[in-house]
Image (cartoon, coloured by chain):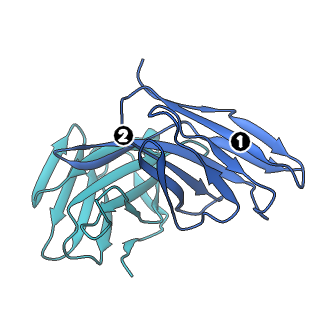
Chain colours: A blue, B cyan
């Protein structure tokens, strides 16, 4: 089945630790995204990538890093510099169609600082 | 600043009624428009996309686009309790580089009462 797989679904981070969230897609989409969603809040763009080996900062990139070494993969590292990382993280991918840039989401990863 | 605005709700409708969700956007040259449904604790899922003025129907859902007035709406006919969710409006603005970023509204919470 085609789709976007995020792992882990739940992750706990200790203060000062870096953690990496995995995102893999087999939809052959060229663009991939990371969003953050806080409870009761909207989606905020962290990073996005339109081609392999290239990515752009979104609105809240500070304290995060990404890589895009393969078309299928776009991992997100939450570094210790991110002071308030507890949130729901959503990976997405998209492809341009006649309807525009249609974005599809993975199931999300919950990150909690303990 | 380019914006997408939605009434946060909650919008409450009785089962079987028509639910009407509205979204306005500030960028007059926006190209394509999307409605997503997000259940509590889950990731957004695409309901419909629309890019031409007028109505687009898919089952119980109808998207309506009026570019002159800069609004897009979603009608849900024969509302069911399972439609209770937050509905996100997203806009693909022409100005966003090469069109791969969406601008998101904060969502409207819909409650369908049995």
Give how far across and how far down residue B101 sits, in percent: 37, 59
Task: Report x, y in % for residue A103.
Answer: 37, 45
Q: Which mark is residue A30?
A: 2
In this rendering, the answer to whether B31 lies above or below B42 is: below
Q: Residue at x 19, y 47 (%)?
A: A99
Q: As displayed, is residue B7 above or below residue B83?
A: below
Q: Which mark is residue A40?
A: none
Please state if B41 lies on the left or on the right of B48 as rendered.
right
- Return the residue nearer the eye: B110 or B55: B55
Which chain does tag 2 point to?
A
Q: Quadrant of residue A52?
A: top left
Q: Position of residue B60 (x, y in %)?
A: 25, 41
Residue at 45%, 59% (x, y): give it: B12
Name the foreground residue: A76 vs A109.
A76
* Up-down relation of residue B30 to residue A25 (above or below): below
Q: Secondary structure at mark 2?
A: loop
Q: Image point 60% across, 63% down: which residue?
A: A61
Residue B9 or residue A41, whichever sits in front: A41
Q: What residue is shown at x 69% (from left), y 33% (from top)?
A: A8
For the N terminus of chain B, the image quarter is bottom left
Residues beneath discs 1 and 2 located on the same chain: yes
- Label 2, residues with CA under 10 Å away: few <14, some 14-19, many ≥20: some
């Amino acid at each position: 089945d085609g789709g976007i797989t995020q792992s882990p679904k739940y992750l706990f981070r200790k203060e000062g630790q870096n953690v990496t969230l995995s995102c893999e897609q087999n939809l052959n989409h060229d663009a991939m995204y990371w969003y953050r969603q806080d409870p009761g809040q909207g989606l905020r763009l962290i990073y996005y990538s339109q081609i392999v080996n290239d990515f752009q900062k979104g609105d809240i990139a500070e304290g995060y890093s990404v890589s895009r070494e393969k078309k299928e993969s776009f991992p997100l590292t939450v570094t210790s510099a991110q002071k308030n990382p507890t949130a729901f993280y959503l990976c997405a991918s998209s492809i341009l169609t006649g309807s525009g840039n249609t974005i599809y989401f993975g199931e999300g990863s919950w990150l909690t600082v303990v | 600043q380019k914006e997408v605005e939605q009434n946060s709700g909650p919008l409450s409708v009785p089962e079987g009624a028509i639910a009407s969700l509205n979204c306005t956007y500030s960028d007059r040259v926006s190209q394509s428009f999307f409605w997503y449904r997000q259940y509590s604790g889950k990731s957004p899922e695409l309901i419909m996309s629309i890019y031409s003025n007028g109505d687009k129907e898919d089952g119980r859902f109808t998207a309506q686009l009026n570019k002159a007035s800069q609004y897009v709406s979603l009608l849900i006919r024969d509302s069911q309790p399972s439609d209770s969710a937050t509905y996100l409006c997203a806009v693909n603005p022409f100005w966003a580089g090469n069109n791969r970023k969406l601008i998101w509204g904060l969502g409207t919470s819909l409650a369908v009462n049995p």
